[in-house]
Image (tube, rainbow, N blue to C red):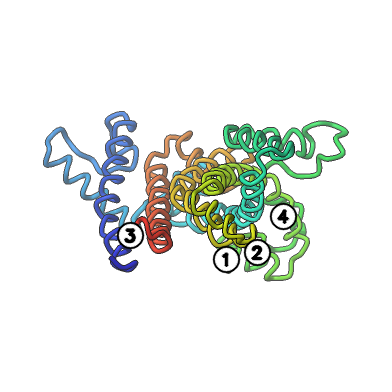
Amino acid sequence: MSMWSYFLKRLASVPPTILIILYFIFVVFSFIGNGSPISSGFPAFSDSITSYLTAFGIFVVDILIGHWGYLTAGTEATYSGPLTMLIDIYLFSTLEVVIIAAPIALIISFPLGRYLGTHHTYRLAKFGRSAVIVGYLTPAYVVGLLLQVLLGKGVISGNPLAVFPITGAFNPIALPSGVPKPAWLESNGVLISSPTHMLLFDSLIHGDYTLAANAFMHLVLPVTTLVIGITAIVTSLLEAGYTDNMGTEYVRSARSRGVPERQIEIKHVRPNAVMPVMASATIMVAFLLSNIVMMEYVFDYPGIGLFLITTMAHGQYYPTAVTIFLLGLILIFGAITIDTIHYAKNPLVRT
């Protein structure tokens, strides 16, 4: 089967998967709404099966066509209005953190995983292995709280390392007082930077380096929290891959023929060591999403995770359901992309 055939086959599983996710959301949040789906934003239904299925059908259509309704004014601290705007306000803020954190984590993970997998007896490798295990087992909210204590401004008086803000995406004092916000930063009274909707990048694009520096300082601790989690899981998988492949028969055979160690690693060990990372990439996406939710809650960072927690806390069940649906879509299409790449790169999967 070709890569494109496999991709189309995986793509065909998306509609039923989406339907299952929507049904689960409908059942759970209709029940949470204390038997009153109208009050929670869900279509009304009676005890009859026909009424129930009709209400579910209306819910599915509304979600798929983007008819998501409105947030109730006064219950959500940063935004009230059309729910479709949450993509511009929150989702891209989260994407900004991921775009910065993921490359940094991979740049650290690959050489670190290689070193730990090829230097088992070194004392530094043993210490690094222990640090990776601790990073893997420590929840994101604990990492975030520790970073706030160690590096957060205003947490410990007199701490010389406490230079990073611990809440929000930027400090309003970075904007000149008494001056209207620029058009690229505000739209209809709502703070939405353009064109990327990611404040740091948009500030750099428009040459507002003061605001860019302020946004960067607010990103340091949230990004570091995600980097620690991603680095730990990728490094542990790479270490296991290197360890398993360094002692295989084909590696010993190559050594016996006098093949240089560097060439053995590049041609034989490294490609096979990366396979466990690719095979587990879907799990890492789910791990990343859960870490994002906890990270944004700890740092009060205005992303999709904080939006999810805020809407749940204020009983905004319909916005909560829509947010979970969006996160589910990200996981589904992320898994399909990763599985297709893994299928193309790993001949064992194609057999």
| Cα distance in 3D space between marks 2 and 3 | 41 Å
- Closer to the chain start, of discs 4 and 3, is 4
Residue 196: image tag = 1
Name the side, left or right, on which 347 lies relative to 256: left
Determine contact: label 4, label 2, CB under 8 Å.
no
Residue 216: image tag = 4
Per the image, the residue denoted by label 2 is 201
- Residue 69, how many percent across, how many down? 37, 51
Measuring 33% from the left and 56% from the top, which residue is drawn there?
67
Image quadrant where residue 151 sits: top right
Determine contact: label 2, label 1, CB under 8 Å.
yes
Query: In the rendered structure, which amino acid carries the disc numbered 4?
Result: Phe
Callout 2: SS? helix
Measuring 45% from the left and 36% from the top, which residue is drawn there?
312
Measuring 61% from the left and 45% from the top, which residue is drawn there?
117
Callout 4: SS? helix
Query: In the rendered structure, which amino acid carries the disc numbered 3?
Result: Arg
| Cα distance in 3D space between marks 2 and 1 | 7 Å
